Amino acid sequence: MTVVAHLGDAAWLKDGEVARLLALLDRDGEEARVIGGAVRNALLQLPVGEIDVATTALPEEVMRRVAAAGFKAVPTGIEHGTVTVVIDSHPFEVTTLREDVETFGRKARVAFGRDWKTDAQRRDFTINALSASADGRVYDYVGGPADIAARRVRFIGDAEKRIAEDYLRILRFFRFHAYFGDGVPDAAGLLACVRARHGLDALSRERVRMELLKLLVAPRATPTLAVMSECGILGAALGGVPYIASFENMVKVESAAGVGPDAVRRLGALNVRVTEDAQRLTQRLRLANAESERLLALECWWRLSPMAGEPAAHALLYRLGPQSFTDRVLVAWARSSAGVADGAWRDLASLPGRWTAPVFPLKSADFSRLGVPAGPALGAALRAAKEAWIAADFPADRDAIKAIAQRAVQEATKASG
C-alpha cells in the first residue's frame, strides 16, 4: 500500500453525501475509498464530477448497510460487484474489489477480493487507478502520479492485453489523451491501438458514439483527432473521410462566435459534406433523432454567406430554428476563406441572440372570413401567405399582413378555378 499524496481539505470528500457514504462502508472490518476519475481530477486541480467508490465489502453487505441507513440501493451490475447507491438524489457507483478470473472481450468472469493492488492492476489507465480514503490519503499501485505529472495516458501493464479485454479502450485511450494528455500519445499505447483497430468493428454503435462525442469536445481534440486520422483509426470509426482542417476551424469559430463547444456540431464539421454523410453517420453511430436532424440540417451549407443580407438570414433562422441555424452558419464559416476575425460572419452567427422570429399572424379563420372554403384551397392560401410573409421579412404592420392575405386568396382562387 503506497500513499503518494494527500487531498487536503477537499470539500467534496470531507462533507456531504460522499462523506456519509464512506463513513457507512469504511468500518466494521471493511474498507472503502473513492476511486478513479474523481481522484485523478482532484490531483490535476480540475472539477470533480462523477464520484465512484470501491470497497472490500461484498455487494450483499453494501446493500444491507445502505438499506439500514435509509438510502436507496440499486443492483445495477451486481454480477460484477456494482451497486448504485442514491443519497439525497445523488447516485454513486459502489463496486466491490475484483480480480479477473477469465476475460473474453468485454465479458469477464470476476472474483471478489480484498486486495487493492490487484483491483488497481485490472483497470485501464494508470491515471484512473488512484484511490483516496476518507481522510484524503491517495494510494497508487501502478505509477499513476508520475503519468499525471507528465500528462501522459498509459495503459496499465500490457497495452494489447488491456485492449483485448475491451476494444472500446482504443477510443478511450484517445479520449483521455485529448482531455488529460500533452504532446504525442504514449508510444506503446498508440502502437497497441493501431494493431487492434480491427476490434472497433465488433463494438456496439452506441458505445462508439458515446466515446466519440465526448472526445470531440475535449480541450486537445484537434491534435488527437489528427493522430487518429493518420493511424486509420478515425476513418474506421466514422466510416468516412474526416476533415481535420474543417474541425480545427470549427473550434476557432465557436470561440470567435462566443458559443460553447458542441459535439454534434463538431461532428458535422468533421465528417459531413453532403446529406449522404449525415445519413451514414446516423446509421453508423446510432445517433439520436435530434442529433440526426441537426446533421441533416447542414444540407446546402455552401450556399450560406453573410453577403446574402439579413432578410435572407431571418428567413433561414425562421425555417431552421436557432440551433440548426447556428450549426449551419458555423460550418459554413469554418469552411469559408474568411478568418475568425471576420465581422460579417460573426454578425451572422450572433443573429439568434439579436432577433427572434415572430409567430405567423394569420390563421385559417382569417381566410374563411375572406371566403376561402375549407379544404385544399384553404391550405394553399395559408401556405402562400406564409411564404409571402417570410419573403417580405416578417412584417408586423396590419395593412401589410392584410394585403398578403388578400393576395394569397386571389392566388388560391385562381388555382382552384
Image: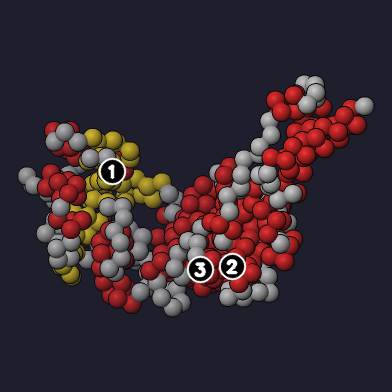
Looking at the image, residue 48 sits to the left or right of residue 291; the answer is: left
The amino acid type, in three-letter code, at marker 2 is Arg
Give the CA separation, mark 2 to mark 1.
41 Å
Q: In the rendered structure, which amino acid carries the disc numbered 1?
A: Pro
Q: Nearer the viewer, residue 234 or 273?
A: 273
Q: Amino acid at mark 3?
A: Ser
Viewer-proximal residue among 231 and 271: 271
Where is 36 relative to 342, above or below?
above
Rendered view: 226 above or below 84? below
Picture residue at 46% right of the left edge, 57% below the top: 214
Q: Nearer the viewer, mark 3 or mark 1?
A: 3
Which residue is disc 1 drawn over? Answer: 91
Mark 2, Cα crowd under 10 Å, few <14 / some 14-19 / many 20+, is many
Q: Position of residue 281 (x, y in %)?
A: 62, 52
**Labelled disc at residue 255:** 3
Q: CA distance from mark 3 to mark 1?
A: 34 Å
Q: Nearer the viewer, residue 6 or 185?
A: 6
Q: Are marks 2 and 1 in contact (CB under 8 Å)?
A: no
Question: Nearer the N terminus, badge 3 or badge 1?
Answer: 1
Q: Residue at x 46, y 70 (%)?
A: 220
- Which quarter of the image is occupied by the C terminus? top right
Residue at disc 3, secondary structure: helix
**Which residue position holds label 2?**
346
